[in-house]
Image (tube, grey):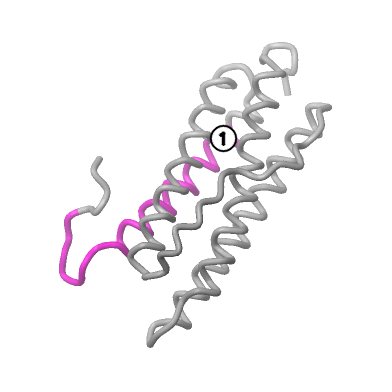
Amino acid sequence: MSKETIDKAAVVAKLNQILEMELAGVVRYTHYSLMVFGYGRIPIVSWLRNEADEALTHAQEAGEMITQLGAHPSLGIGPLLETHKHDIGDILRESLQHEMASLRLYYELLDLVRDASVFLEEYARRLIAAEELHVGEVDKMSRKPGEVAAFVAD
């Protein structure tokens, strides 16, 4: 890793934002999984808990990147919004907002490290791909049966 060619302070700050956002995802998805009721509960709860697990993995990876750069990971957590709306549609819309915010952070990281650190650039690209996949999954889940058009405006 070429630590001399990146703005280390800016990269660490962005990685800490990512760490905090992913930790917020752990809390958010765990909370949502507890608030699902009805006939379709089991597969939805399973999906939400998998999302929480993946968010924790992403948070841990961000923390590892921070310590590899010789910095200190944040103990903070990103924004949490309790709307008290627990309809599956509401949960999916809130999830989509969270995923889009996470995706923006990874793109911002990519802009900071592009052509300066292959290691950090590949990390950012891999996580962008994962977040784009999540956005696509939530988009498909948000559509009404039979609708093919994307729920998310491109």
Residue 153 falls within the magenta-colored stretch: no
Total marks drawn? 1
- The residue at which mark 1 appears reads as 124
Residue 137 falls within the magenta-colored stretch: yes
In the displayed structure, would residue 126 be above or below residue 135? above
Disc 1 residue type (three-letter): Ala
Frontmost residue, 95 versus 150? 95
Q: Is residue 75 left or right of residue 57?
A: right
Q: Is residue 120 left or right of residue 142?
A: right
- Which residue of the protein is positioned furthest toward the top in this rendering? 5
Horizontal and vertical percent position of residue 116: 62, 17
Mark 1 nearby-residue class (10 Å; few <14, some 14–19, many ≥20): many
Horizontal and vertical percent position of residue 36: 46, 76
Task: Name the residue at 63% across, 62% down.
Answer: 53
Mark 1 lies on a secondary structure that is helix
Frontmost residue, 101 versus 150? 101
Task: Name the residue at 44% across, 58% down.
Answer: 83
Residues shaded magenta: 122-149
Task: Name the residue at 42% across, 69% down.
Answer: 86
Residue 143 image-quadrant placement: bottom left
Main secondary structure of the magenta stretch? helix
State which quarter of the image contains the N terminus.
top right
